[in-house]
Image (spheres, rainbow, N blue to C red):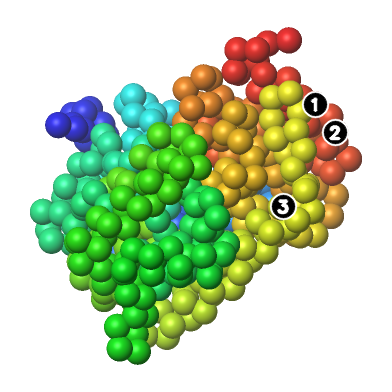
Amino acid sequence: MPDIKPEFWEKICEVSRRLADENDFLVVSHHDADGVTACAIMVELLTSMGKNTDYLILKQLDSTTVAKVKEKAGKTIVFTDMGSGQQSVLKSNGIEGFYIIDHHPPEAEYVNQINPHFFGFDGGSEISASGLCYLTAKSLGNTSMAHIAMVGAVGDMQDSDGAMKSLNRLIMEDAEKQGLLKVRKDLRLFGRQSRPLVQMLTYASDPVLPWLTGDEAACAAFLEGLDIPLRVDERWRNYVDLSSAERNKLISALYMHLLDYNIPEFVIQGMIGDVYTLLHEQKRTELRDAKEYASLLNACGRQERPEIGLQVCLGDRGENWYEARTILKSYREALAKGIRALKDKGMVQQRENLYYFDACGDVEENIVGVVAGMAYGAGIIRGDKPVLAFADDKDNPQMMKVSGRGNRNLTRRGLNLGVALREESRKCGGEGGGHDIAAGARIRRANKEDFLANMDKRIGEQLGKGK
Ligand code: C5P
Ligand code: C5P
């Protein structure tokens, strides 16, 4: 049974008591699914308490974007999903009296900071920023957004071992108890709610289905061979429309298919795991499944429309929901284009301890990290080394954005991309940070070669292959 340590709960209660005494807020958050859900939970909490609440969503908090925060001086600033790793930037820019609710590795202790690392919890896998905002709300008696916290955790892939654990599990149970969420073991392919069966298989990337992924006709034939009707009347059937006998038949057939192609057993087993259904959302829509919901929010945030995703989290099922689906469509196209470019142009290169690709001009900086992560599932790179992806920095042609992605196997062996990117980017005229498994940075373009060589050496050291 997971447990929240009393000293951690006491810290949350202490910080939220101080928060409750303030009146005029600015919530500053990160643009991905976890950041947007964290922001939504705080905005809902504060407005329900009658507080004046504004928000600002940034692609990252650094020495450039901190100017936008400074413009709002006078408000009580609450940083969510950011801030812990940027305390020195905040202080050197004269920002004071702020709160931090963040799961990234912290630079230092700070009185108004809620961060699980100080209490022995891993912010990469045991709790997300939205989960921390939920616990803050819970300490003030508001548990209405527990399901939204789960969307944030799924967005940060905190269930990548097949189930939620630790503090995430506690929040999951809160959501279940309130009838907001149902959790069951099932097929974890993306699109189980909203995609017609053929599309679900055609676009499967985690894992890739040999001879099926990317081939619509082969997927249709595969399903027809199982006697699973693809449509009923005029309507295409989605996975959630299948009977449990049909689901079992499809799962067994996929299992056998992957075994036939010698896909490792653990990859096949990863296809089955907990799936999270948001019970108050309409069936067959993206919002009914936590993974699809998170993808919708990532689409909005990473395409510079985070406020649309935020309004959806706050309950808008009108204009913003419609707009979000349009944005999701172009996001999927951008990701597919990115993956195609990686494959067709043979962009991926390798050093001794890492893979890398330069997507400048092909993939935008905001989504290059997602494309890098997908490259594993798509079989473009193997899981034996982490990957670094470079893209143009939109705001400064002399700089480059770098995204790093790894996997649990590598972090268990000592990989820490957050530390490596923070320290090595600093030496190359930039700044960065993040988690052990996923991190990002900005570096000077002129220093790219040095940076790559240093990262190769640094990752080798982390993986115990010191040279
Ligand atoms: O800023 P933040 O912590 O929310 O970003 C975490 C990023 O790491 C997300 O883009 C998430 O998809 C990625 N991630 C990953 N693999 C994991 C865990 C997280 O790619 N196993
Ligand atoms: O941008 P990307 O999705 O690759 O970011 C992955 C992780 O690295 C996120 O947790 C993000 O907050 C962090 N990051 C950072 N500093 C940057 C870029 C990303 O701390 N300059």
Q: Residues within 10 Å of mark 3 (few under 14, many from 20)?
A: many
Label 3–label 2 contact, CB within 8 A? no
Q: Marks 3/1: CA distance?
A: 22 Å
Q: Secondary structure at mark 1?
A: helix
Q: Nearer the viewer, residue 315 or 135?
A: 315
Q: State which quarter of the image contains the N terminus.
A: top left
Extreme residue in the front direction:
225
State the residue position of label 2: 449
Label 1–label 2 contact, CB within 8 A? yes
Extreme residue in the left direction:
177
Mark 3: amino acid: Leu
State the residue position of label 1: 453
Q: Residue at x 82, y 41 (%)?
A: 444
Q: Residues within 10 Å of mark 1 (few under 14, many from 20)?
A: few
Q: Which labelled disc corresponds to residue 342?
A: 3
Regarding residue 170, the answer to whether it shows in the image is yes
Above/below status of 416 relative to 115 = above
Q: Marks 3/2: CA distance?
A: 20 Å
Q: How many marks?
A: 3
Residue 299 in percent (x, y) is at 52, 65
Q: Secondary structure at mark 2?
A: helix
Of the residues tagged 3 and 1, which is closer to the observer? 3
Extreme residue in the top direction:
467
Disc 3 or 2, which lies upstream in sequence? 3
Horizontal relation, residue 57 to residue 41: left or right:
right
Q: Residues within 10 Å of mark 2 (few under 14, many from 20)?
A: few
Quarter of the view holding residue 141: bottom left
Q: Residue at x 21, y 70 (%)?
A: 280
Of the residues tagged 3 and 2, which is closer to the observer? 3
